Image (tube, grey):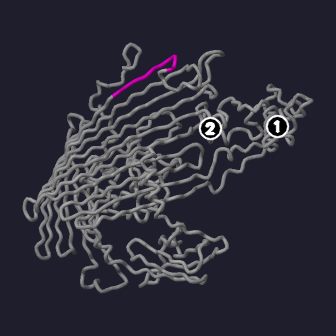
Amino acid sequence: MKNFFLLALVFLFQYITVNAQDAAGNITFSGKVIELKTKTALQGATVHIQGTTHEVLTDKKGGFSFLTGQRFPVTLLVSFVGYQSKEFVVTNSDPVTIALDESAAQLNDVVVVGYGTSTKKNLIGSVSKVNPAETKNISAGSFDAQLQGKVPGVQISSNTGVPGEAVNIRVRGATSINADNDPLYVIDGVFINNSSLQTLSTGGKASSPLADINPSDIESIEVLKDAEATALYGSRGANGVVIVTTKRGNFNQKPKVSLNVLQGAAKAPKLWDLTTGPEHATLVNEWWINTGKDNPSLNRTEVNRPFRPVADGGRGLPEEQQTYDRLDDLFRTARLQSYDAALSGGNESTKYYISGNYSKQEAIIKPVYFERAGFKVNLDQKIGDRIQVGTSNTVTRTYRNQGRAGDGPQGGLLQAALHTPTYLSPYNEQGVPVGRAGFDNLRLLLDNYDVNSTSLRYIGNLYAEAEILPDLKFRTSFGVDYNNYDESEYWNTNLLLGAPATAGAAGGYATSSIRQFQTWLNEQTITYRKKTGIHKFGILVGNTLQSDVLTRTYAEGRGFANNSFKRISSASVVSGSENWTKATLTSFFSKVDYSFNDKYLIDFSIRADASSRFGADNKWGYFPAVGAAWRVKEESFLKNVEVVSDLKIRASYGITGNQNGIGDFAALGLWTGNAPYEGNPG
């Protein structure tokens, strides 16, 4: 995976400027960020020291402070949504006040919405736009994790914090107690599969297919939140929609080379305070004696307590015990490295964007890490004055070295580190790691458990667009999302699950899972937009054909000649299964919108979805939406009131659906693809 990038790295580092920080030059300074006109504090503004990775957010009083290894003067880059970004030079340690002015241009920003674009000022539905520049310095394995805290009304959380693993995204809360609550992701017009393909029992952890997307290739991210904005996506819009647009070149642009190198580190700020060996031994003695008093039949007394003098048959007195802190063996300072190179440009008829990337991010827990290498090509070509064709292609290879999680015999790393008594040595008298009853020794688990996964992902889209009349356009596209996910797991004979069932028997336990997910998508749209004086009118008509196919192959083996053999074909007992499932979707949709003087806005949309998951009596679902808005700020009585930057009153109603809670063959109640036949999997 790395060989492709070795030559590129030599080239990249020729452009890296290392900014040395003199420890003797440490400086401190503080300040406040306010709104220019009203002088009110701006909470959540981003303050960044130019040329470094030092960045903070202002508190509720607009305040911020820095302790940095730079020297005066330093240049601050200050930004806040809806305001003009500002550079400010700090020359000494005196408190500073930085005033930001509102950005009128923000209202004219183009926002991607369902099957089209709009400006912020003319939005009726609830849509949030995220600028990748706001998230580029956030260390995360996938772009969904980078959105944390950046989108109002969207809750983003991670169960583990491990790079490349799935995060929970809830747009305006959960919508179902038994169905999927993840939003729909649309990348360059392709509806992608964002559910984890992981099947092995690694303690409930799930990988994130969204980690296959390089964040540096993203041009913009829009989150559609309410029913008015998402109803155009019908039976998949109930949980919100995240639209991702990747970078493209520009016509008549000279070739532009972009190089980015990121190095970083992360560590846990504070670990648990564990009992010492003597403290733990004292607690065991107290527990022993107290349970004996509660139940005399146990014959637990102070005389036969576990930690008593060795001469009396005990383990030694509590104060004689050693302390073994396993947290230091488990946690580490995790390293992050990321390298990106991109070339973009174009002439009068062709534009292009080509990029390559490699990144590796360790988790703060050994031995977990996430590795990604990818390549992207976006091309657009004009054919005459009325036709344009183009393609988007992303190929990504990811590798995840994983670790165990959970409790019990299959328990994981944290269980072994936290639950093992601190007075127990990881090694016996001969210096050999020893197992413990109930769960594995941490050192054995780190050295003898092997689980990893590899993913090969392709997301591509091919389109053609024709201007039939000056205001009438036709567009057709064909998209593909292919993901091949291969995961393997091996427990050798030193671990509980891999231990031989009887003395002298062969041990070792291995599992393997391969999943292939294929989506193809074909869409046609006709768009008519007309502007006459103060009147703007638009109509959209389109249809969608989509097919999703998932193939699963699973195998496991027990009993290996020795720990050098890990392939299931080498096992003495082998079993496996395979299944296949498919879902299809046919849709028709339309939207009409009207604007009077950019002041009074109204739109109506409807989508009809027919899914193979729906029953015969309810094969079609209909999802209408209507919305209206009044831009009060544009009225004469408010237009010149400076204290009000913008005021818009809007109302909307819509119906959305969530077909992800329905199984692929739920409508066929008498048929299943996984029923046993004569005691064997069918």
Find the residue positioned furthest to the left.
Answer: 469
- Give the quarter of the image for residue 302: top right
Mark 1 surroundings within 10 Å by alpha-carbon count, few (fewer than 14), some (14 through 19), many (20 or more): many
Give 146 or 682, whichever is nearer the viewer.
Answer: 146
Helix, strand or loop at mark 1: helix
Task: Depth check: give the residue in front, 341 or 62.
Answer: 341
For residue 125, above or below residue 485:
below
Membership of 577 in magenta stretch: yes
Residue that protrudes farthest toward the top in the picture: 678
Q: What residue is disc 2 on?
A: 446
Helix, strand or loop for the magenta stretch, by majority:
strand
Secondary structure of residue under mark 2: helix
Q: Residue at x 59, y 22 (%)?
A: 562
Q: Which residue is mark 1?
A: 285
The residue at the point 22 percent across, 49 percent down is 462
The amino acid marked with disc number 2 is Leu
In the picture provided, is 652 more to the left or to the right than 168?
Answer: left
Q: Amino acid at mark 1?
A: Asn
Q: Is residue 152 above or below residue 478?
A: below
Q: Quadrant of the N terminus?
A: top left
Q: How many other residues sit within 10 Å of disc 2, few (<14), some (14-19) or many (≥20)?
A: some
Q: Nearer the viewer, mark 2 or mark 1?
A: 2
> Which of the image's four quarters has the C terminus?
top left
Q: Position of residue 669 (x, y in %)?
A: 29, 27
